[in-house]
Image (cartoon, rainbow, N blue to C red):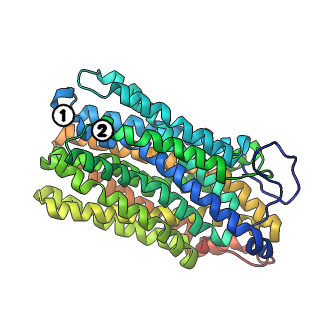
Amino acid sequence: MTAPNTAPAPSRGGRWIQEWDPEDETFWKETGEKVARRNLLFSVLSEHIGFSIWTMWSVMVLFMGPEYGLTPADKFMLTSMVTLVGAVVRVPYTFAVAIFGGRNWTIVSASLLLVPSVAAFAVMKPGTSFDTFLLVGLLAGIGGGNFASSMTNINAFFPLRKKGWALGLNAGGGNIGVPVIQLVALAIIGANGGPRVLLGIYIPLIVVAAVLAAVYMDNIASVKNDTGAARDAAKDAHTWIMSFLYIGTFGSFIGYSFAFGQVLQNQFGRTPLQAAYVTFIGPLLGSLIRPVGGWLADRYGGARITLWNFVAMAGATGVIVVASTQKSLPLFTIAFIALFVLTGLGNGSTYKMIPGIFQAKAVAKGLEGEAAASYGRRLSGASMGLIGAVGALGGVGINLAFRQSFLSYGSGTGAFVAFLAFYALCFLVTWAVYLRGPATQTRTATAAEAKPQLSYVEV
């Protein structure tokens, strides 16, 4: 979908960079790195607040006691639908960067966060119908779209050798919006405040993020709308394979972020305050470690890190099942937080794999230098929106699985057993597609004359 090049492009007003070639080391050292890091910083801020608004209903439901008249199943349905909207809007948000420019769309997308925040402020009180809460909750889903546009934008700013770190930092800084809003909620609950206080804090922050994006960010003029890239990415099997793996990593992260507090309340009888004391820890650690997952993938290969990460995720889930059946809250909490950490590592490693995969395909086609880099940027940028959208749908599945598990068994144990089986399947797919020796050799055989060679093991 995106195709950066060094050809001058006509100015369309605002802050437009006419030439951009991050793969040129001289350009990168003299000009590119400083500009890219500045855009990364303010991209992280906007995406961070977007994540907070998207996941604010995971906090709001903790405030909603018996006086609101909602059952546990109602609350899981509410958070599931919010997650669904956040997943779906990621696709158009990906295209928006190419149509409007990264800076311009960051301003718009940040400003749009005022809509769900003001609407929630208006209706958040006992006596409001479930349908009204659901409608207003759906509006909050637009915060999930900020991730896709932000990642697509930052992907264009950084060279391939820096993408794992940059994308990991960008996404991790955004993901950390989940525990931050939970921490703020903890402070408000502890001070006997209400949900409107929480919203009153975030509304001015949204304005600040939009203003800072307008002042300090840039558009890349040579990033142009390329529907052919989106079509090519959609036809490529690797887009859908990586989408499946991203369900296992990011889908788990966002799904558990929405559900953790509710599971503690419904399965272990925790009060809103008791739940809030621990729900932020898992998302916080998972967010902070995401750049480490990208760095490890840069160093050792994304496929290797992803493979063993799924092994560890399955192990942590197994411990959770044991803790759940034995009703051990300490063991359950420790294992759940460990699982959050692993989802963060996996988020970083899987996203690093995306540009690496398409770069490997370029080498296999015999492309070299800037031609290979341009091909990789074009398809990886297009695929990121699709992968991010499908991956976020995993969060919907997790909340629906918890809802059904509590309806059927009165606990989340059944859902965790299903998650364990899914992580085992993700392990098999990663090994079979990206690490199985003969398959890897076959895929790279056509690149025998291309220099440098890049195998799928290295993605």
- The residue lying toward the viewer, choosing from 98 and 453, is 98
Q: Quadrant of residue 97?
A: top right
Query: Residue placed at 29% from the left, 20% from the top?
Result: 129
Quarter occupied by the C terminus: bottom right
Query: Residue 148, image x and y in percent?
Result: 57, 48
Query: Label 2 amino acid?
Result: Met
Q: Quadrant of residue 34?
A: bottom right
Secondary structure type for disc 2: helix
Q: Is there any visible trace of residue 251 in the rendered image?
A: yes
Q: Is residue 289 above or below residue 251?
A: below
Q: Residues within 10 Å of mark 1 (few under 14, many from 20)?
A: few
* Rendered position, 389 above or below 427: above
Sequence order check: which comes first, mark 2 or mark 1?
A: 2
Q: Position of residue 291 (x, y in %)?
A: 50, 67
Among the 4 quarters of the image, the one containing residue 433:
bottom right
Residue 113 picture location, percent across and down: 50, 37
- Disc 2 + disc 1, Cβ < 8 Å: no
Residue 367 in sight: no
Give me the disc on residue 207.
none
Give the total of numbered labels.
Answer: 2
User: Neighbour class for label 2 at 10 Å: few (<14), some, many (≥20)?
Assistant: many
Badge 1 amino acid: Gly
Q: CA distance from mark 2 to mark 1?
A: 10 Å
Q: Residue at x 74, y 71 (%)?
A: 28
Where residue 338 appears, as percent x and y from the top left, is 30, 66
Front-most of residues 261 and 80: 261
Query: Which residue is label 2 attached to?
Result: 60
Given residues 244 and 50, the one toward you in this image is 50
* Residue position for label 1: 65
